[in-house]
Image (spheres, rainbow, N blue to C red):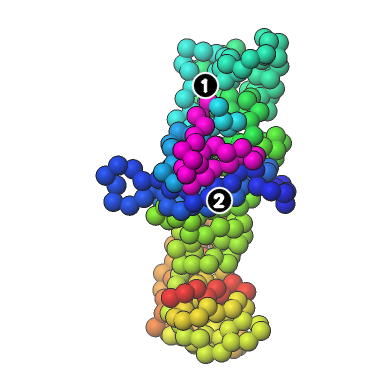
Amino acid sequence: MPSDEDPILRARGLGKTYPNAAAPAVAALDLDVRRGEFFTLLGPSGCGKTTTLRMIAGLERPDAGRIALAGETLSESTRNSFVPPHKRDIAMVFQSYAIWPHMTVFQNVVFPLEGERGLDAATRRRRGMAALEQVGLAALADRGATLLSGGQQQRVALARAIVREAKLLLLDEPLSNLDAALREQMRTELKDLQRRIGTTSIYVTHDQEEALSLSDRIAVLRDGVLADLGTPEELYLRPRDAFTAAFIGRTRFLPCRVVARDDAGALVETEFGAVRCAAAAPDGTVQLMVRPEHILLGPPSADAPNRFAGTVEDVSFAGRTVAYAVRVGSTRLDVLAMSVAMRAPGDAVSVELPPDRCVLLPG
């Protein structure tokens, strides 16, 4: 787990604009990554996450700002200083894996060590086999790289990165070429690997589920700027703006009006009634955010706080879960429930919005 010491990577005022671009790819970006942390850059296509990763790696030269790794300046625009990629203590796993087809698995893994002075063959062998052991491929060390499956090639790329024993590991959507089942398996393996070796990792993805399951902290980027930053729990349960709430997971925004504030939170008036929220209400126009899986669905029952009568309008069965559309007054609410007690269109039900899952965001 990350420590509370000074960040191992620090970026300040980072900026990059490509020729003929209408807007910067990255603008005035500040990031701190803690030692031993799994840190994810998350956002839609074109948000600047890969450009940021490439600037950290030295594959792109920033137009503005400063990047420092373990106190060493890697780039600083005001001094026109720039450390080239091969001189940075950084390893990187690319989306395409970049496996050499004419080499064996072992030769692929130890290739980054060929240029290191003072490393004899025995040391290279020891480090290469240790890296393959970490990813579970030691038995395939002498196999040709072209004879590997997609998941095995991904593991080779990981082993080749960790064999360098670099201060920082960068991963650019390394699971995107895998099928869904293998991708889920590799998420678990990647998280276990990062915990075992304890390296600091920066991961780029547009997959929200991937980011939530892997990360210690997530930086959400939007149009080249930092939209939000926090732990997976913070960003999912208590997002600070509507963009983060909508991008990470499914959600529904309901128009509302604040009618009371107190130490316990706020009371808002919606189209279907008053809703108590445990969170504080921001100033100005607000909207109520409730995620479908947080809405409780039950039989018609007596009045209770944040409980309203409704009618099921639509049902979509998905195995373990069922998505319902429930009409409450003039509002249609999306509800995601376990497929234990099935409801049918036309059923009278109650929906309950737990106060600690009702989030108020700027309108």
The label number, if any, that marks residue 235 in the structure image: none
Q: Classify 293 as above or below 276.
A: above
Q: Is residue 314 above or below residue 88?
A: below
Which quadrant would residue 88 be assigned to in this image?
A: top right
Q: Position of residue 222 (x, y in %)?
A: 43, 56
Q: Which mark is residue 31?
A: 2
Element at label 1: loop
Q: Residue at left 46%, top 38%? A: 80
Does residue 187 show up?
A: no
Check if residue 241 falls in the magenta segment.
no
Precedes in sequence: disc 2 or disc 1:
2
Residue drawn where x is 44% and y is 46% of the image = 64
Instruction: Please say whether residue 79 is one of the residues in the magenta stretch.
Output: yes
Q: Which residue is drawn at the image coordinates 33% and 43% (left, top)?
A: 18
| The residue positioned farthest toward the left in the image shown | 20
Residue 152 in picture, x, y percent from top left: 55, 26
Task: Give me the C-alpha separation between circle 2 and circle 1.
Answer: 37 Å
